[in-house]
Structure formats: C-alpha cells, structure tokens
C-alpha cells in the first residue's frame, strides 16, 4: 500500500496521560499536514511541514501538542497531559507541493478517546 | 482568517435526482477550491478541484466557481445511494504566510434515498 498510513488507528487513554501518533506519508510527498476533526465539523488545521521544517502551527494549538518530522519522512504528533476535549479524529495528509493540483491525500486517521 | 461556509444540511434527495451543495468563502483572493467526500468514519477523499470561473464536469459531478460572488458549488447528477456522505468544501491558501494550507468548511451531509 503506497497511501498515507497512520498508527494507531484507535487510542483510548485516561485523562492526564501522554499519547503519540505516527504518520507515514506517501514517499515522494514533501508536505505533511496534521488536522483534527470532531463530529459534525470539518477538519481543523493543526500544523504542517515541508520536508523536516515545521512551517506553521495553529494558534489554537496549546503547548501540550507537539509535532516532529525529523528526517522529512514520517511524522509524530504528541499530546501531553491529555484532556477530554482532545478526543477527536487526528488526520494526517501529505501532498507534493509544486504539483498542479495541490491535492492533499489523507490517511485513515487516528481516533483518540480520552476518558 | 479564511472562512469557508457551507449550507449545513442535512440534504436529502431521492435516487436519480440532482443534489446541489453550496459553499461560500471570505477571501476574495483565493484561487483554488476542492470538494472532498467523507464517508462516515472514513477520511476525506478528493472528488474535484477547480481553479477557473465557470463549470468543470467529471462524470456525474460538476463543480461551479464564481469568484466575483465568492461561491463554489457541487452538483451531483443522477444521485445514487452510494453518494450518501459528507461533502467538504475547501480552499487552498495560495499566498502569504499560510501558503499551502487547506481550509475546510464544516461539511454538508447528503443522504440519497432509494
């Protein structure tokens, strides 16, 4: 499978615990995005990378959230001291910046439930 | 902040009818627009993108863009029950500090009943 893959697909954790999600983008894609989606809402931007550089982080994102893409390939999103309000689907997407469409290809998402 | 507004729905149409989904946006300078389909519990998948004013057709789908009025629409002809999903409108920030970011509307839920 050469699509975007995310792991784990589901995570249930207790409030206050740390969680980490991993995303493996399509191999030739230079951009990687993290979005969060809650029920009945569209995806909300969190952050994105071009290669290993983090270009932007949403101002809505608290300091408990951090993302890395150390070698310009896979990325991790860590949430520290989780809160119930963090429960959501975390979507990773990748794109080839400079292509003629700008299309984002999404992974299947990592669903987080904070008890 | 680039706002993308969609008619919230839900929209329900009978099989074979035309489904019309609408989206308005606030950034007059935006150039690139996308329609994604999202089945329940799944991730968004691209249906169409449109850059130029006018219509763009792909099979049963037609995207319409009117930059002067700042709206984008998606028409689905001969709607099928398999078209039942949430449709997300998105615009691509193509300049400035947010270059490359995709802004989504909240989506319109479509149900096609047999």
Image: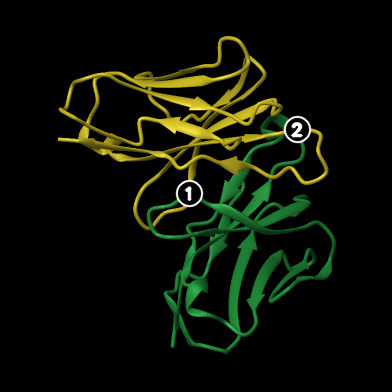
* Mark 2, residue position: A97
> Which residue: 57% across, 89% down?
B16
Q: Residue furthest front?
A: A1
Residue B57 vertical position relative to residue A53 in the rendered view, above or below: below
Spot the yellow chain and give its letter: A
Q: Position of residue A40 (x, y in %)?
A: 37, 58
Residue B95 vertical position relative to residue B34 in the rendered view, above or below: above
Residue B10 vertical position relative to residue B92 in the rendered view, above or below: below
The numbered mark 2 sits on a residue in which chain?
A
* Mark 1, residue position: B43
Closest to the observer: A114 or B31?
Answer: A114
> Which residue: 77% across, 46% down?
A101
> Which residue: 54% across, 65% down?
B6
Residue B1 shows in the view: no
Q: Position of residue B84 (x, y in %)?
A: 47, 72
Q: Quadrant of residue A9?
A: top left
> Which residue: 64% across, 38% down?
B101
The numbered mark 1 sits on a residue in which chain?
B
């Amino acid at each position: 499978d050469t699509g975007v893959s995310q792991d784990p697909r589901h995570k249930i954790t207790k409030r206050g615990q740390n969680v980490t999600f991993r995303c493996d983008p399509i191999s030739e894609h230079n951009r990687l995005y993290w979005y969060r989606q809650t029920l009945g809402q569209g995806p909300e931007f969190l952050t994105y990378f071009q290669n290993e550089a983090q270009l932007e982080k949403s101002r809505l994102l608290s300091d408990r959230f951090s993302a890395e893409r150390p070698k310009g390939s896979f990325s991790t999103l860590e949430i520290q001291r989780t809160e119930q309000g963090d429960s959501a689907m975390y979507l990773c997407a990748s794109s080839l910046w400079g292509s003629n469409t700008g299309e984002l290809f999404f992974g299947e998402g990592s669903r987080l439930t904070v008890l | 902040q680039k706002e993308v507004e969609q008619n919230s729905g839900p929209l329900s149409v009978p099989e074979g009818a035309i489904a019309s989904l609408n989206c308005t946006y606030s950034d007059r300078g935006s150039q690139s627009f996308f329609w994604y389909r999202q089945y329940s519990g799944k991730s968004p998948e691209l249906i169409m993108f449109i850059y130029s004013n006018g219509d763009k057709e792909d099979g049963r789908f037609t995207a319409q863009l009117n930059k002067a009025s700042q709206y984008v629409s998606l028409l689905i002809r001969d709607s099928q029950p398999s078209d039942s999903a949430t449709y997300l409108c998105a615009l691509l920030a193509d300049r400035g500090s947010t270059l490359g970011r995709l802004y989504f509307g909240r989506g319109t839920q479509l149900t096609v009943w047999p």
